[in-house]
Amino acid sequence: MMINKEEERKKGFKKAIDIDEGRRRREETTLQIRKTKKDVRLAKRRQMPSAGATGGMDATPAGLAAASMLAAGGAAPGGYTGTPGAMDMSAMNAGASSAGNSKLENLPQMIQGVMGNDPAIQTECTTQFRRLLSIEKNPPIQQVIDSGVVPRFVEFLQRDDNPALQFEAAWALTNIASGTSEHTKVVMEVGAVPIFVRLLLSPNDDVREQAVWALGNIAGDSPPCRDLVLQAGAMPPLLQQLHQGSKLSMLRNATWTLSNFCRGKPQPEFGLVRQSLATLGQLIF
């Protein structure tokens, strides 16, 4: 009888959480948070300019190449001579360098230049937009989208006669796609994906590498975006970039993009990624 009363009394107390069990749960939660943050960081990357510049271009391998294109013979494909033309380019450069503080004060000029027909001004103003989108903290992605220039950037991707303009437009779109899912959706809805896939076979190394980066950002947004990129035929030309003759930056970017093509749940259709197995094996060994 006494035993039954003791058992009834114990039932009235709230069961305590085991100390070891509580510690285990906290560790699991912490690990899951870290994993989530890591996955987000790996899925998308915003291309940042390196310190210093040459000829007004950022001193990345692609930037230096674009600078050399603009400087070659005093003219670039598409007729860009580096001459300011009708707009005050020096003022625009100064504004772009302090874009975080100027709050897009030169935006109307930049929009006008992008929407115009002068190849030199198109390239210069696209570069200014790209620099705005490369700001380290809180880049004004939504403001750039709201300005209406994204479809124009996609048009510039098709300017095979002007690789410098293609490169700058591709870089700007890459950084837009590095934002939220809504930002990525904008890039997809204006038809950039099939054009980026085509640019994976561009004769220009830097345009090709920028296309790799852009498709990696788009595919890294979500499984539906990944599947759309794969269905656009991006895998075969991407694998062509992963060979011994490729420069190190291309190998790194293409490997990262390939990982985004293969990651995510639900998993991609095996038939769309099966051809990457041999390349993955080579990369591992």
Image (cartoon, rainbow, N blue to C red):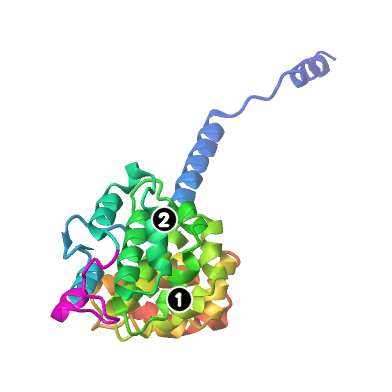
The stretch in magenta equals 69-86
Q: Nearer the viewer, mark 2 or mark 1?
A: 2
Please name the predominant secondary structure of the magenta segment in the image: loop
Estimate how packed mark 1 is, as few (under 14), some (14 to 19) or many (20 or more) residues with alpha carbons within 10 Å.
some
Q: Secondary structure at mark 2?
A: helix
Q: Secondary structure at mark 1?
A: helix
Q: Amino acid at mark 1?
A: Glu
Query: In the rendered image, which quarter contains the N terminus?
Result: top right
Q: Is residue 56 visible?
A: yes
Place of residue 72 in the rendered image (x, y in percent of width and height, measured from the top left) = 16, 79
Question: Of marks 2 and 1, which one's residue comes earlier in the chain?
Answer: 2
Q: Give residue 108's mark.
A: 2
Q: Between 157 and 284, which is closer to the camera in this rendering? A: 157
Q: Between 130 and 260, which is closer to the camera in this rendering? A: 130
Q: Give residue 54's mark.
A: none
Q: Amino acid at mark 2?
A: Pro
The residue depicted at 50 percent of the width and 46 percent of the height is 32
Q: Could you tell whether 84 is left or right of 180 in the image?
A: left
Q: Is residue 73 magenta?
A: yes
Residue located farthest toward the front when viewing the structure as drawn:
86
Q: Between 266 and 195, which is closer to the camera in this rendering? A: 195
Against 1, is 133 above or below? below
